[in-house]
Amino acid sequence: VWCSKAADSYCFDGMAGKGMMLYHGQGVDQDEVAGTALLVMAACNDHPFACYFLGHEYYYGISGLPQDHKLAKYWLRKAHDLVQDDGIRSTCMTDDDFEDCETMLKELEGASQLES
C-alpha cells in the first residue's frame, strides 16, 4: 500500500518499489510493462536502484528492452555515481546489486576501450 501511495505522490522510492512489485508480481498482478515504466520514471529522477535496474536490463536485453551496451553503461554509471556521491545505498539497492553494477561497468568499460 505504501509503495502505491508513494508512487502516486511522485515519491521516487515509491515508484521504484511499486515498479519492482509490478514487474515481479509481488502482492499484485504481474505487469512487467507497467513496472518497467515506473522504474524508468524513477531512474530519470536519479533513483539509484532504478538506474541500476535499467542498466541491467539493457545489458542483458531483457524486460522488452533491446540489448544495448551503450545505454547499459549510461544507466549503470549513473547508478554507481549516485551511490558513490551519496555515500549510501538506495533503500532498494543491495550490496550485491552494487557489486553486480560494478562488474558490468568494468566489462563494458573494458569493451569500449578495446573498440577505441
Image: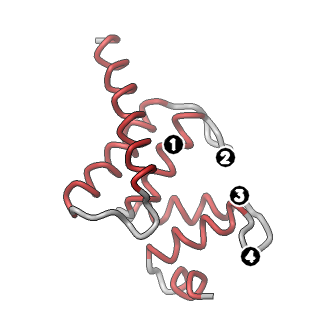
Give the numbered dot on residue 27.
Answer: 4
Pointer 1 or 2: first along the chain = 1
Real-space CA distance between mark 4 and mark 3, rounded to the nearest whole angstrom = 14 Å
Q: Amino acid at mark 1?
A: His
* Picture layout, residue 19 above or below residue 53: below
Count neighbours of disc 2 (C-alpha within 10 A) and say few if under 14, some if 14 to 19, many if 20 or more: some
The residue at which mark 1 appears reads as 56
> Is mark 4 in CB contact (under 8 Å) with mark 2?
no
Q: Amino acid at mark 4?
A: Gly
Real-space CA distance between mark 4 and mark 2, rounded to the nearest whole angstrom = 19 Å
> Is mark 3 in CB contact (under 8 Å) with mark 1?
no
Check the picture and name the quadrant holding the C terminus. Answer: top left
Check the picture and name the quadrant holding the N terminus. Answer: bottom right
Image x and y of residue 58, in percent: 53, 39
Residue closest to the far front:
95
In the image shown, does 14 or 88 lie closer to the viewer? 88
Give the numbered dot on residue 63.
Answer: 2
Count neighbours of disc 3 (C-alpha within 10 A) and say few if under 14, some if 14 to 19, many if 20 or more: some
> Which secondary structure, mark 1?
helix
